[in-house]
Each structure stands twice: as structure tokens, then as C-alpha cells.
Image (spheres, rainbow, N blue to C red):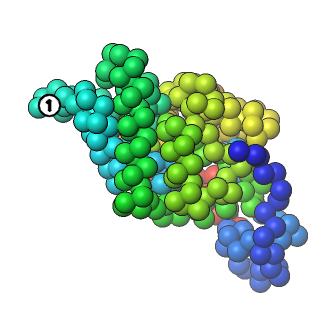
Amino acid sequence: MTIDTSPATEAATAPAPAGASAAATAIAGASAAVPHPTARIGDRPVELVVLDMAGTTVRDDGLVERAFALAAERAGFAPEGEERERALDYVRETMGQSKIAVFRVLTGDEELAQRANAEFEGAYAELVGELGVSAIDGALETVRLLRASGVAVALTTGFAPSTRDALLDALGWHDLADVALAPAEAGRGRPHPDLPLTALLRTGAGSVGSMVVVGDTQSDIGSGLAAGAGLVVGVLTGTHDRAELEAAGAHAVIDSVADLPALLGLDEA
Ligand SMILES: [Mg+2]
């Protein structure tokens, strides 16, 4: 994927009337002549926001867990009864991590893990095709507002690149963010810092302190902290609850990614 560094100039419109909020102006795609507020972490301008996909910007609705169950059956390591419950608990606990890494632990066998991972990717794409997939309310607007404010945006996932692309296709999001990264393109998945750090390198952001990392799982939080992000934010639209995200060290927990602009001061005129 290429990095689009062109300014958001689509649908340039006349300057908004006095009194219109800066946020509304930005969402309307106003021209560069209209000054946008600056996203900030305290006094520091934000240069890059790294957003997780499933559970943070994309509705999950249990699709990942269902795909895991299908993959386990198809790959032939389907545990039953209590063992199955324990496996699903582990899947939930490690949500956000690289899927192949999770299968390695669950199967203890590289070949079986690879087969299960391939089955998982297939099952997830099938479920997305069958049931559809939709954005978290306000996610699209948040990304557009951030980019209109001069902030680079990266989408990150624990899926394989092909599944990431299937999601972006289904959502029509191929050009939404500056970059969209899967673990295979970054090195290690979460909770390692590779995804946010690769996003920083790819977008040319100046420092980890000017980076914000946002996710719905403890692995997202761990990844953001390990990368030294200036702000690590948990959201409550996915897998883990407030207590779990705070226990992982989130600097802030918000209801949804739709509340991110306000957290960064972008709702101020
Ligand atoms: Mg997630």
C-alpha cells in the first residue's frame, strides 16, 4: 500500500459561516484556507493516530470468535467441552494479537498452526462475505477529521494482509487511511510495538511522543505502551472492558473512537 500524503482537498467548499464549529467544517471537507484546530496530547501536537480495526473502527459482532471455531473444526484440532471453552477463553484474552501466533500456542504444532491460520483467514472472509461488515459509528468521520487536521492515520490489524484487504474492500476503505498494516508487514504482532512503530516509519511522523495508539484489547494497549506512544487509548466497542484496558495501562479509556476527536481537542472551535 502506498502512503497518500496529498492534502484532503476533495469537495472543497466555500468557507463555513462564522460560528460553525471547526469540527463540522473539517467534516464537510473545507479547503485548506479554513484553519483546522490542531490535535493535541496536552501541549504536544499529534502527528499520527494508529487505529486498530476489528472492535475499534470495524464492528466485530463475534465474527472473529466464530471464525476461530470454524477454523479449529476444519483444521482438525477442534477441542471439545471444557477444553474448547478454555481455547475460546484464550482466543478472547489474546484478541488483537497476531492470529498465527495464537494458533501456535493453541496447537503447539507449526504445521497445524499454519493450517488453522489459513482456515481462519478463509472462514473470516466467508463470514464477512455472508454477514457483511460495518464500521463502528463515527469511525469514518473520525479518520476524515484527523486527516483534514493534518494528522496521519494508520489502520492496524492482527489479521493476515489478505484478510485486512477483504475488510478494506467490504468497507470501501482502501483510501481512507494513510497506511493499513498487518503483522506480516511490520514484523511481530501485538503486544509487540512493531505495528505502531512501522506506522510511524511509513508515515514519517517525527516522534513516538506525537503518536496516539487506540484499540479495544489489552494487546493494543501493550503494543502502544511498548512503542512509547504519547497517548494510549482504550475503546469500549470491542473485546475488553474498562477495567481490563485500565489494568493493561491505558492512559485513557473512551466509549468509542467517535470520542477521540474530543479527547485530542479537535472539538474546540
Ligand atoms: Mg481489535
Residue that sits furthest to the left in the current view: 81
Q: Nearer the viewer, residue 206 or 22?
A: 206
Depth check, front residue: 101 or 151? 101
Residue 113: x %, y % from top left: 38, 24
Q: Residue furthest right?
A: 33
Q: Is residue 151 above or below residue 22?
A: above
**Quadrant of picture, ligand 1:** top left
Q: Secondary structure at mark 1?
A: loop
Q: Any atom of ligand 1 within 8 Å of the CB at mark 1? A: no
In front of the other: 36 or 219: 219
At 56% from the left and 24% from the top, the residue drawn is 188
Q: Nearer the viewer, residue 132 or 60?
A: 132
* Residue at horizontal 41 percent and vertical 61 percent from the top: 132
- For residue 123, above or below residue 250: below
Q: Position of residue 121 (x, y in %)?
A: 43, 41
Check the image and report above or below for 237 versus 22: above
- Residue at (30% x, 31% y) in the render: 75
Name the residue type under label 1: Glu
**Residue 45 visible, this orientation:** no
- Picture residue at 41% right of the left edge, 43% below the top: 122
Q: Is residue 105 above or below residue 17?
A: above
Q: Where is residue 133? Give x, y as percent.
A: 44, 59
Q: Position of residue 156 (x, y in %)?
A: 57, 41
Neighbor class of circle 1 (other Cα within 10 Å; few <14, some 14-19, many 20+) is few
Quadrant (top left/top right/bottom left/bottom right) for the C terminus: bottom right
Residue annotated with mark 1: 80
The number of discs equals 1
